[in-house]
Image (spheres, helix red, strand yellow):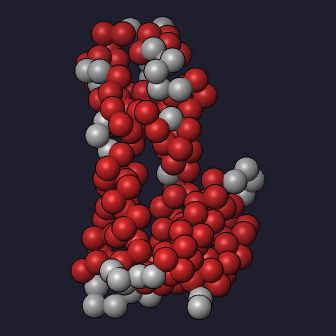
Amino acid sequence: MPRTRVDTRAEIRAVAAELFARQGFEKTSLREVAERLGITKAALYYHFPSKADLMRGIVQPFVDEIEGLLADREAAAEVDPRQFLADYFDVVLRYRQVFELVLRDVSALAQLDLMQQMLAWRNRVYALLVGPDASPAQIARVTVAIGGLQDCATTEGPPEEFRDAALEAAIAALAK
């Protein structure tokens, strides 16, 4: 039976992300992804020449959006911490499945050479929210604020319902 779906690349990414999240990057084969979609391995390879390319196709939009958010705020004359935290929460929420996949299988990030980039985000966030010469106490507060937002955005259930509470808690964590 011919396939009627239009965006095969998006379908492949969605199914692979689900399988990678459930089974892990290493334990998931491209054969499994192809079988689940009802396509041949050759068709899958046409869209993604390797498993690493497929993983990058899943993770890269999230990376690009975080990079864009950070670059936008770094270029601004002044950063509104509440707005930055709200925007950060929204990005993590939008890419919730990808973010959870990354947290569960950091080895895949290392294979994609994304680990250093993602670790560098932390320093960029510190600089945005508390400045480049932040004290250990300020860094701890930013870490709690960002970590709490990430956890709230990826918690089971509808995180939209407690977005405002999560933002208030993050702002409170930043306060002296």
Q: Position of residue 171 (x, y in %)?
A: 60, 83
Residue 6 visible to an observer of this rendering: no
Q: Residue furthest front?
A: 136
* Residue at 32% from the left image edge and 50% from the top image edge: 116
Q: Nearer the viewer, residue 55 or 8?
A: 55
Residue 94 pos. (x, y %): 52, 56
In the image, 114 versus 9, the foreground residue is 114
Residue 143 drawn above or below residue 55: below
Quarter holding residue 2: top left
For image coordinates 56% across by 32% down, the residue present is 21
Residue 35 placed where, x, y %? 49, 11
Query: Along the horizontal axis of the image, is 137 left or right of 47?
Result: right
Q: In the figure, residue 164 lies in which quadrant? A: bottom right
Q: Is 130 positioned to the left or the right of 75 in the image?
A: right
Give the residue at x 31% y 53%: 117
Tell me if residue 67 can be seen. yes
